[in-house]
Amino acid sequence: MQNLWNDSEADKLVNAYGEKGVDRDLALRVYTTRLLGGEPRLVLHGGGNTSLKSKATDILGREWDVLCVKGSGWDMAVIEPQGLPAVKMEALLAARGLNSLSDEDMVAMQRSNLIDPGSPNPSIETLLHAFLPHKFVDHTHSTAVLALIDQENSEEVCRAVYGGRLGFVPYIKPGFDLAKAAAEIYERNPAVEGLILDKHGIFTFAEGAKEAYDLMIEFVTMAEEHVAKNGRNPFKPVVLPAKLATPEEIGPYLRGAIAIDEGEGRYGRMVSDFRTSEKILDYVNADTAEELALRGVSTPDLSIRIKTGPMVLPAPEAGKLDEYRKVIRERVAAFSARYKEYFETNNANDDVERTMLDPMPRLTLVRGLGLFGHGRSMKEAKIAADVGEMLVEAVTGAEAIGSFHPLALSDLFELEYWSLEQAKLAANKPKALSGQVLLVTGGAGAIGAATAKLFAAQGAHVVVADLNGDKAAAAAKETGNASIGVACDVTDPASVRAAFDRAVAVFGGVDIVVSNAGAAWEGRIGELSDETLRKSFELNFFAHQSVAQNAVRLFLKQGTGGVLLFNASKQAVNPGKNFGAYGLPKAATLFLSRQYALDYGAHGIRSSAVNADRIRSGLLTDEMIASRSAARGVSEKDYMGGNLLGLEVRAEDVAQAFLHQALAERTTADVTTVDGGNIAAALR
Ligand SMILES: [Zn+2]
């Protein structure tokens, strides 16, 4: 592994922080923590931690010896000094005299000894850092080291690779007991330069930041070299079908099968992140892949991301998707049954009260294709996929030099259901639309963009489809929440299909569609050219049908219902003079929304429309507002507020109506009016 220490970079950070009153040691602690955290082969999403023994002054001006240790919730790759809260050493060291200390008391003791009570919780490995005497202590879950220690004879392997340079600590769950055991092993031989924590990771320590970091890289490199030198190709590939289905073809089936059935037609949906590479393919195609998946995970804290390990699916043969859909359902049922059994068996071992987490996989290996990470948000799905890639590497390494033998599932259970680990996830409470994907057409326009933003704020990931790809990308960026923009001409069926394909490729599927794109043509109906009327029907009716068809195609694949929403406009119910070219197809679209509600209600697919009027947008521009209000001899404000409430109706109000329809679980074939009140246009 490359050593990334760079004197001038380190000095630069020391100087920059020096100006803010941060001392050299803490600045260097931040520097090497970032170096370690930026390398996924060392540290993944919340795993690993570092510390510094230093001094700090409290509000009363008293100086204390403190441990600055990584705070829970901070990512090492982007850590700041405040991500390393200072805890009084005196209290931490005093804890060593106790015979036992519960996790809850340990957290309380650490929190009550913070210099700044507003700090995040110090790492769950704080006491281990405190009990070692060195100024700088670094801890990672190195993938290469895991290949050595996920072995039945891990102690022997470590002795062969490291000689006496590293102490060997048998597996103990992180916390007080592990900290005490590690300190005792260190004290038996204070010449060691670090500690191996069996089935878990590695610690290095030194008086300088650079020295502790150098040791970490050196020991990790030794592990990598050992695997490279002694490893053999551990995998025999299975025979694959001649022609494989694509990840996009199976993605919606998989996504539907792993949605958490919450009853009453409600689902806790997840999004998926697909990855593939030569390394991943070697692994997923190995004849041992299914058996390896049952053994566990490479380091125990991965269990909070991918539970007990991946689900493995056979290779999907092209053209046989109906059969494959059944296979997916069977495998998901088997995975969740196994997970329930794992929970019940291990939960029965003590009288702690626990609630079972959902039993769905977070990592799926598909032979012939690659891996899918799943999560209630794109962030979680990507974390699961990152974890999957590192699991593949660690297990491949372990199998190359011996046999993958990770922590037993009973010990893993203790960690997965440990209150302190669950606390790491508690911050991510799902929102109303978490895990759902919205596709909105005309997404860069006023109503489309407002809808995208509002749905994203409720947790949805949004595919902003617009004729103008650049504007779609900009609107997606505005929307946040990992939303994407796609160029889409809704009057071209191939372009619509491509937009849905992109949604599947990026998120795994679609759950809600707001068919919003439209444009108006004016003219007295008797004199209107055929061409104009047909053009309007293409955009204001047939395009909605093409979007809805694609949506329903995906909804049926997923089997978890879905929501179809149409922008029908006031013209659909209350024609405006010379607006026939617009109103006629919109009336047909309103009918279309009801036809979909009727034909697909039995599949849990809901279909509704919004009847909005006089919204400042591409259809009603500022210039049009100026000329129309002048023509009527009223102010612009009175023109825009010419309704029962006397208020201008905004794009955000229309978005609110779409959101209401999406969330109202027993509402379909509905038309919601958003016009500030217009009795002539009221539905009857
Ligand atoms: Zn650890």
Image (spheres, helix red, strand yellow):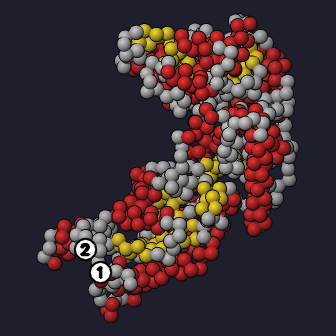
Q: Earlier in the sequence, mark 1 or mark 2?
A: 2
Residue 391: percent from the left, percent from the top? Answer: 72, 37
Identify which amino acid the numbered label 2 is placed on.
Answer: Leu
Name the residue furthest bottom: 526
Residue placed at 40% from the left, 9% from the top?
62
Residue 117 vs residue 486, the one in the foreground:
117
Viewer-proximal residue, 519 or 302?
302
Residue 175 horizontal/vertical position (percent): 65, 23
- Image coordinates of residue 660 in percent, x first then y, are 44, 65
On the question of residue 331 being in view, the answer is yes
Find the residue positioned furthest to the left: 633
| Amino acid type assigned to the residue bearing label 1 in the image | Ile
Q: Would residue 220 be seen by someone viewing this image from the given angle?
A: no
Which circle marks residue 644 in the picture? 2
Helix, strand or loop at disc 1?
A: helix
Dot 1 and dot 2 residues touching (CB under 8 Å): yes
Q: Residues within 10 Å of mark 2 (few under 14, many from 20)?
A: few
Task: Name the residue rendered at 20%, 72% in the picture.
Answer: 639
Q: Which residue is mark 1?
A: 679
Q: Is residue 345 above or below residue 461?
A: above
Q: Is residue 494 above or below residue 420?
A: below
